[in-house]
Amino acid sequence: MDYTLQRNALLREVRRGRVFGGDACDADPYLLRAARWHGEAAGRACPVCEEIELRELSFVYGRELGPFSGRIKHTTQVGELAATVGDVQVHVAEVCVGCGWNHLTRSFRIGDGQPRRPLRKPPDWLD
């Protein structure tokens, strides 16, 4: 699913002054930190501040990932993961580490459709 229409509608409202830029640029501090250290360059400037290059984060979710669901994966890792899983949801978000703009850009499913057992929690993890 592509969220470009929602993104463009929000940006149009920000430019018209109907939505305050601070309301649109409300990234969580953890999301900003993740974008700074683990995000991939999106190759385009931030649509709000137009100064800083956007970063993209790919989050993977799935029952079969077990305790590893919700992790950030690099684009190449998502491709590799697609060959080894049955059904995993991937959410890609764009984040500006300068002004805090963030938006879900797309989501999609990967895998071969064959159900698998969830991964177990490693025995050395503390609860």
Image: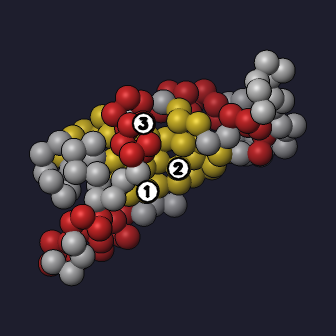
Mark 1: which secondary structure? Answer: strand
Q: Choose top left, top right, bottom left or bottom right for residue 64.
A: top right
**In the figure, 9 relative to 114: above or below?**
below
What amino acid is found at the position of numbered circle 1 in the picture? Answer: Leu
Question: Residue 84 appears at what percent x and percent y?
Answer: 72, 29
The residue nearer to you, when weighing 66 against 1, is 66
Cβ–Cβ under 8 Å for marks 2 and 1: yes
What amino acid is found at the position of numbered circle 3 in the picture? Answer: Ala
Sequence-first disc among 2 and 1? 2
The residue at the far front in this view is: 127
Q: Which residue is mark 3?
A: 34
Mark 3: which secondary structure? Answer: helix
Q: Which residue is mark 1?
A: 104
The C terminus: image quadrant = top right
Q: Choose top left, top right, bottom left or bottom right for residue 6.
A: bottom left
What amino acid is found at the position of numbered circle 2 in the picture? Answer: His
Mark 1 to mark 3: distance in Å? 15 Å
Q: Which residue is mark 2?
A: 91
Q: Residues within 10 Å of mark 1 (few under 14, many from 20)?
A: some
- Say which mark, if any, is on residue 23: none
Mark 2 to mark 3: distance in Å? 14 Å
The residue at the far top in this view is: 124
Sequence-first disc among 2 and 3? 3
